């Protein structure tokens, strides 16, 4: 397959590197220091499933020079999706498929509004990964997992083709769930509360899950997301919150969320697409979300300051 990775940071870079390692034709869309490092040294991956380098790597800052591809994996931050969608238009032919991998529940709709809903499936990923330096990705902990599927639940040739590509890649578990919408919301139930509680407490998983008061806050925020999902017609499993808490208990003690790391570093974050989305969608649905409102309000001043600083 011809695959483009739009946003070649930790998430997009890791999955793209594994596909390239498996022999797929992968083009990385990158910019700045990351682009320069990948052009010079290739894409260097340190992983629990084995270290490797994609060299030479097909990398560019200009989607127009790539031509049409079979699939685009979207690895930008959630707050960059709408701008990214306009930039990736040159990559799309009649049969091209776009897979969002953002934290949140709104990316597929945002992509579809720009690119056409017929091009977009829904997707998510679960991995502990960071861009430790330009062109250098470090993956730790659990086996990275990617899930994708048609938004109406049917099995399609394009989804099966992408699944086959990932099946040949090491260091990745690829799944087509029966209900991708429920899968996306179940991840959201984890990442929005975990990231915001981590940012408010400034503590990693091992500490915030062990303190009774903080654990109660985390569980309350998760339960609010669960109620909200059902109010929006999402068929979450009855034990979604319990399973998610067990997942948190199994994380490495030092684990943190990307939103938490961005906020604590003073960078613009996905606050609006995570806690902010819970608050916003809760108001639309008439579902009270007081724990998430507290977390959002507590973190909003730092987010505003980070975005003001980025514009200066």
Image (cartoon, rainbow, N blue to C red):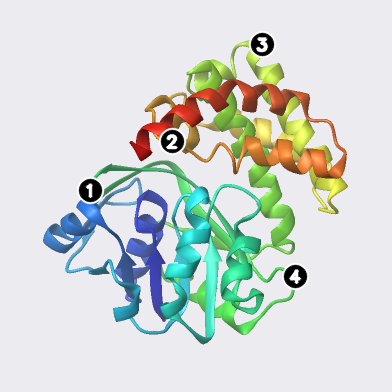
Label 1, secondary structure: give it.
loop
Numbered circle sitting on residue 153: 4
- How would you rate the neighbour count of disc 3 (Cα within 10 Å): few for under 14, some for 14-19, many for 20 or more? few
Residue depth check, mark 3 versus mark 1: number of the one nearer the observer: 1
Q: Position of residue 98 (x, y in %)?
A: 53, 71
Residue 124 visible in image: yes
| Residue at numbered disc 3 | 212
Residue depth check, mark 3 versus mark 2: number of the one nearer the observer: 2
| Residue at numbered disc 2 | 307
| Residue at numbered disc 1 | 134
Real-space Cα separation, disc 3 to disc 1, in angstroms: 39 Å
Position of 311 with respect to 274 (left or right) is left
Q: Is residue 201 above or below residue 305?
A: above
Real-space Cα separation, disc 3 to disc 2, in angstroms: 33 Å
Q: Position of residue 264 (x, y in %)?
A: 42, 25
Label 2, secondary structure: give it.
helix
Cβ–Cβ under 8 Å for marks 3 and 4? no
Q: Is residue 21 above or below residue 310?
A: below
Position of 266 with respect to 281 (left or right) is left
The residue positioned 39% from the left and 66% from the top of the image is: 5
Q: Is residue 18 above or below residue 234?
A: below
Earlier residue among tags 1 and 2: 1
Cβ–Cβ under 8 Å for marks 3 and 2? no
Q: Position of residue 271 (x, y in %)?
A: 56, 36
The residue positioned 80% from the left and 48% from the top of the image is: 236
Earlier residue among tags 3 and 4: 4
Q: Is residue 266 above or below residue 46?
A: above
- Tell me the quarter of the image containing the C terminus: top left
Earlier residue among tags 3 and 1: 1
Real-space Cα separation, disc 3 to disc 4, in angstroms: 39 Å
The residue positioned 47% from the left and 60% from the top of the image is: 83
């Amino acid at each position: 397959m011809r695959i483009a990775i739009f946003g070649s940071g930790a998430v997009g870079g890791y999955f793209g590197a594994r596909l390239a390692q498996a022999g797929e034709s992968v083009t990385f869309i990158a910019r700045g220091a990351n682009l320069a490092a990948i052009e010079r040294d290739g894409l260097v991956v340190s992983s629990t499933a084995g270290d490797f380098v994609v060299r030479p790597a097909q990398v560019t800052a200009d989607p127009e020079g790539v031509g049409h591809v079979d699939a685009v994996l979207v690895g930008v931050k959630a707050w960059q999706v709408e701008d990214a969608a306009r930039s990736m238009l040159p990559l799309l032919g009649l049969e091209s498929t776009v897979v969002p991998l953002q934290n949140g529940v709104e990316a597929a709709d945002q992509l579809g509004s720009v690119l056409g809903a017929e091009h977009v499936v829904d997707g998510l990923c679960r991995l502990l990964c960071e861009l430790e330096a330009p062109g250098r990705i470090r993956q730790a902990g659990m086996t990275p997992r990617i899930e994708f599927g048609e938004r109406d639940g049917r099995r399609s040739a394009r989804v099966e083709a992408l699944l086959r590509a990932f099946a040949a890649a090491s260091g990745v578990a690829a799944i087509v769930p029966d209900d991708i919408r429920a899968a996306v919301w179940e991840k959201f139930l984890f990442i929005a509360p975990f990231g915001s509680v981590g940012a408010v407490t400034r503590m990693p998983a091992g500490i915030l899950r062990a303190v009774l008061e903080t654990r109660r806050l985390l569980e309350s925020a998760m339960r609010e997301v669960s109620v909200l999902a059902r109010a929006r017609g999402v068929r979450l499993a009855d034990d979604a919150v319990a399973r998610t808490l067990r997942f948190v208990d199994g994380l490495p003690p030092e684990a943190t969320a990307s939103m938490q790391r961005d906020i604590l570093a003073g960078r613009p974050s996905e606050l609006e697409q995570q806690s902010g989305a819970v608050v916003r969608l809760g108001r639309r649905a008439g579902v009270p979300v007081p724990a998430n409102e507290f977390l959002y309000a507590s973190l909003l001043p730092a987010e505003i300051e980070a975005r003001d600083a980025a514009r200066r």
